[in-house]
Image (cartoon, helix red, strand yellow):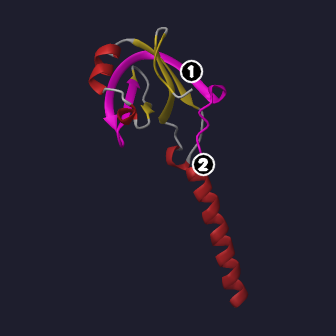
């Protein structure tokens, strides 16, 4: 009986550790691991904790700059500069239990034409 409880405890601990690692693995923000997308900006808004979120026309995904407002970016200025314009976003290609559908995408770099607005590279 004791062996059964020990075995259940070990299995539960290992499964918990695996789930924890899947949920909190680091994001590879390298250029080689990024996906590039270009589209017309539909909306910019604050989301999460000081994140700046972008939505493109015809795309249901939310592209976000993590803690963008803490990094010196200004939401009003971005809205004036980028409103209804064609922008290019490079986002991290990763999977997480928090984002199984991949509808929330971490921005590595944001550009308007040849001008880099934000970059993590």
Residue at (31, 34) in percent of width and height: 46
Q: Secondary structure at mark 2?
A: loop
Q: Quarter-wise, where is residue 8 in the image?
A: bottom right
Vertical side of 73 occupied by 21: above or below: below
What distance separates the C-alpha of mark 2 from that of mark 1?
22 Å
Q: Nearer the viewer, mark 2 or mark 1?
A: 2
Which residue sits furthest right? Answer: 3
Q: Which dot marks residue 79?
A: none
The residue nearer to you, when weighing 30 against 89, is 30
**Which residues are drawn in magenta?**
26-55
Residue at (60, 27) in percent of width and height: 34
Q: Position of residue 64 (x, y in %)?
A: 43, 32
For disc 2, the marked residue is: 25
Residue 47 in the figure: left or right of residue 115: left
For disc 1, the marked residue is: 36
The residue nearer to you, when weighing 9 against 66, is 66
């Amino acid at each position: 009986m004791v062996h059964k409880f020990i075995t259940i405890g070990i299995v539960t601990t290992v499964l918990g550790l695996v789930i924890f690692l899947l949920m909190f693995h680091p994001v590879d923000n390298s250029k080689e691991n990024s996906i590039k997308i270009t589209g017309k900006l539909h909306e910019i808004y604050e989301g999460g904790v000081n994140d700046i979120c972008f939505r493109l026309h015809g795309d249901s995904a939310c592209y976000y700059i993590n803690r963008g407002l803490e990094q010196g970016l200004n939401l009003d200025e971005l809205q004036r500069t980028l409103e209804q314009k064609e922008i290019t976003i490079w986002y991290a290609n990763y999977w997480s239990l928090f984002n199984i559908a991949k509808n929330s995408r971490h921005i590595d770099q944001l550009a308007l034409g040849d001008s880099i607005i934000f970059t993590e590279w």
